[in-house]
Image (cartoon, helix red, strand yellow):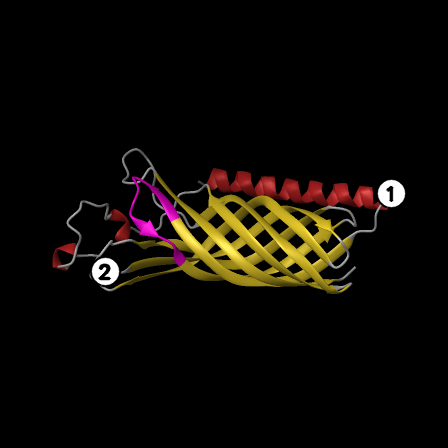
Amino acid sequence: MKRDIRNISAAVMVMLAAAMATPSLRAQAHYRPHISVGVRAGTDMCRTDMTPAIRQSWLWGGMGAVTFRYTEEKIFGLAAELGLTTRGWREDFEETSLEYNRALTYITLPVMTHINFGGPRARCFVNLGPEVSFMISEKTTANFNYRDLSTVTEWPERRRQTAQLDMAVANRFDYGITGGVGGEFYLTPRNSITLEARYYFGLGNLFPSSKADVFSASRCSTIQFSVGYNFRLK
């Protein structure tokens, strides 16, 4: 796992350096670059894809980030963020009144290619790139004793996986691919607001994943809806 984190971190740094260098060279010859900073906040819909599969539904949470963006006057740029996001899952107990939520809070760092097109007052954009993150806290909420299921009278009769209910998270680092689409609307030449829908697909596993372990895969995925504000410095 440490080797994977080093590899993805190195890839992020190489991508950042290359993306910063290439637009700068082009800008000297053809374009005037723009640099913007801002904030972004919204809501998350989270799942954790496990093998063997568990019955679950979307867990709702919140997210927020500070943003940095370097763009050309044409269509290409680089976007990076430092934020907090919610991941995890919500168990689906069918027709019973049982509830179980596992919410995980992560510090996130996506570094994305930013492609935008449109007019001076409104533009569409696409963001795509790698993301690394680190879990800083977790919270389990349940209305039954998930550590002793023999005491739960409403427990569903159908056979289901239960190991994940009290299994400790083994890997706090996560890495994956994130991508989003949205629109940007300029209030003035230097001030704009954004609306974005974004998807994150994790490549790391929450739980141990050797042949002897319960789960061979336990990867987080998230759908985000956010509103942002950008201020152009240059």
Nearest the eye: 50 or 8: 50
Which quarter of the picture shows residue 13?
top right
Q: Is residue 213 magenta?
A: no
Work out whether residue 166 can be spotted.
Answer: no
Tell whether 204 sits left or right of 208.
Answer: right
Which residue is labeled 1 in the image? 29
Residue pictured at 60% horizontal, 55% vertical: 81
Q: Marks 2 and 1, Cα distance to the nearest angstrom?
A: 63 Å
Secondary structure, mark 2, is loop
On residue 98, the disc is: 2
Crowding near pointer 2: few (<14 within 10 Å), some, many (20+)?
some
Residue 11 in picture, x, y percent from top left: 59, 39
Q: Going by the image, does 153 lie left or right of 18?
A: left
Q: Which of the two residues, 32 or 205, is positioned nearer the viewer here?
A: 32
Which of the labelled discs sits on residue 90, or is there none? none
Check disc 1 and report its element: helix, strand or loop: helix
Q: Residue at x 56, y 52 (%)?
A: 109
Q: Residue at x 48, y 52 (%)?
A: 223
Relative to the observer, which residue lies in front, 225 or 29? 225
Specify the quadrant of the image occupied by residue 87: bottom left
Of tags 2 and 1, which is closer to the observer?
A: 2
Task: Give the residue type at disc 1.
Answer: Ala
Q: Is residue 110 visible?
A: yes
Which segment did they paint magenta? Answer: 48-59
Instruction: Name the quadrant of the N terminus.
Output: top left
Task: Name the residue located 30 percent from the left edge and 42 percent from the top edge.
Answer: 53
Provide residue 57's location: percent of width, then percent of height. Answer: 34, 53
* For marks 2 and 1 on the same chain, the one whose residue lies earlier in the sequence: 1
